[in-house]
Image (cartoon, rainbow, N blue to C red):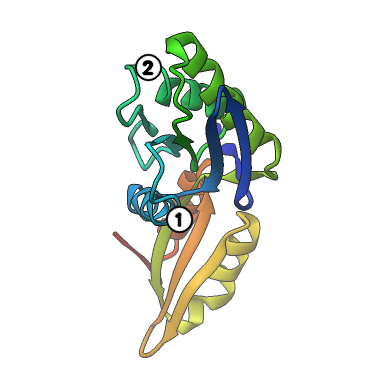
Amino acid sequence: MEDQYHSLSGDSEGGYREKGSKFFAYAYPAISEEEVKERLSELKKQHHSARHYCYAFVLKPKEGQEETYRASDDGEPPHSAGDPILGQIRSYQLLDALVVVVRYFGGTKLGVAGLIHAYKTAATDALANSSIVEKYIEQIINIEFDYAATSSVMKIIDQHSLTILDQSFTENSYYQLSVRLRNYEAALADFSELDQVKVKH
């Protein structure tokens, strides 16, 4: 199962100018729609006198679902801004990525073709200035186990390259583990075979 994807390691900026209009482009890593809203809110404060805040984002699929994406023209003619921005995110094959292009109107209309070119070029500039990294889609496994099973549990953790996100030790031991999607079913099966381990859902 394919569980690798590309994303942005940090924020980057770009821009474009055409007939007096200025297009400021910003590329961000983003893992949720709430984060997208926060970024947009920040930019609207920063560029409070701008005319349009057009954007697109693509979020990686959650368990059993398709990826989430959106493109907004924010008052520009339909498909003249959001779609060209989204197209650039797609061309870089990015997930968990947001690109916002802020436009200051320069007094001269650019026409739909001109707008498409401007938003595409600004978005491309921001992404060209970004640092792209390879990441993995991961799942969470929660287990509870007897102390006596610790060595067996650690062996499975090492075998499937699991990451311990959280742990607690009371009467029983508890681990919250992160696992690459491709190793999820195998790790789950191995834990389920141990009598002293309970997989918590």
Residue closest to the eye, 76 or 19: 19
Residue in the picture at 38% in, 90% down: 170
Label 2 SS:
loop
Kindly tell me whether residue 57 is visible in this rendering. yes
Residue 181 percent across, percent down from the top left: 50, 44
* Position above or below: 151 against 109: below
Question: Within 10 angstroms of label 2, few (less than 14), some, or many (20 or more) residues?
Answer: some
Between discs 1 and 2, the one toward the N terminus: 1
Residue 46: image tag: 1
Q: What residue sits right under mark 2 in the picture? A: 79
Residue 49 percent across, percent down from the top left: 39, 47
* Position above or below: 140 against 74: below
What amino acid type is highlighted by mark number 1? Gln
Residue closest to the eye, 95 or 195: 95
| Residue with the most extreme bottom position | 170
Residue in the picture at 66% in, 33% down: 125
Tell me where residue 66 sits by quadrant.
Answer: top left
